[in-house]
Amino acid sequence: MLKTYYLDVTDAVRVLHRFELHFADDDEAIQHSKELAAMFRHRHVLDDEGDLAITVLDQSNRKIHEETVYPPGPQRT
């Protein structure tokens, strides 16, 4: 039976997009987040701020994994 997972694409401040997907288990959801992050790194140009991540949440909204797409950019003064 498939379980519901949420993948939140976030920057340093907010959730940019939430995907609701179904996977057999946590490992499959985590693997999908890694593949999605790799796709973003390959297709999107990094801006100055960076700090983009994909967070995997289970159906009770418990965080089970966070995959960094781009690390935080340099601190602005």
Image (cartoon, helix red, strand yellow):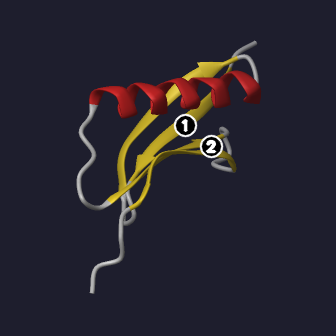
| Residue 27 image point, x, y percent | 75, 26
Tell me which residue sits at (38%, 34%) in the image. 41
Q: Is residue 77 above or below residue 58?
A: below
Q: Is residue 5 left or right of residue 20?
A: right
Q: Is residue 64 above or below residue 27?
A: below
Q: Is residue 13 left or right of residue 46?
A: right
Q: Are marks 2 and 1 in contact (CB under 8 Å)?
A: yes
Tell me which residue sits at (73%, 16%) in the image. 24
Are there few (<14), some (14-19), or many (20+) residues within 10 Å of tag 1? Answer: many
Q: Is residue 12 above or below residue 42?
A: below
Q: Pick whichever of labels 2 and 1 is earlier in the sequence.
A: 1
Residue highlighted by disc 1: 6
Where the N terminus falls, by quadrant?
top right
- Amino acid marked by disc 1: Tyr
- As measured in the structure, the alpha-carbon distance from the residue carrying label 2 to the one carrying label 1 is 5 Å
**SS at mark 2?**
strand
Instruction: Name the foreground residue: 64 vs 1.
Output: 64
Where the C terminus falls, by quadrant?
bottom left
| Residue 56 image point, x, y percent | 60, 41
Tell me which residue sits at (29%, 27%) in the image. 43
Are there few (<14), some (14-19), or many (20+) residues within 10 Å of tag 2? Answer: many
Q: Is residue 53 above or below residue 35?
A: below
- Amino acid marked by disc 2: Leu
Residue highlighted by disc 2: 57
Instruction: Name the foreground residue: 49 vs 64.
Output: 49
* Residue found at the very far bottom of the displayed protein: 77
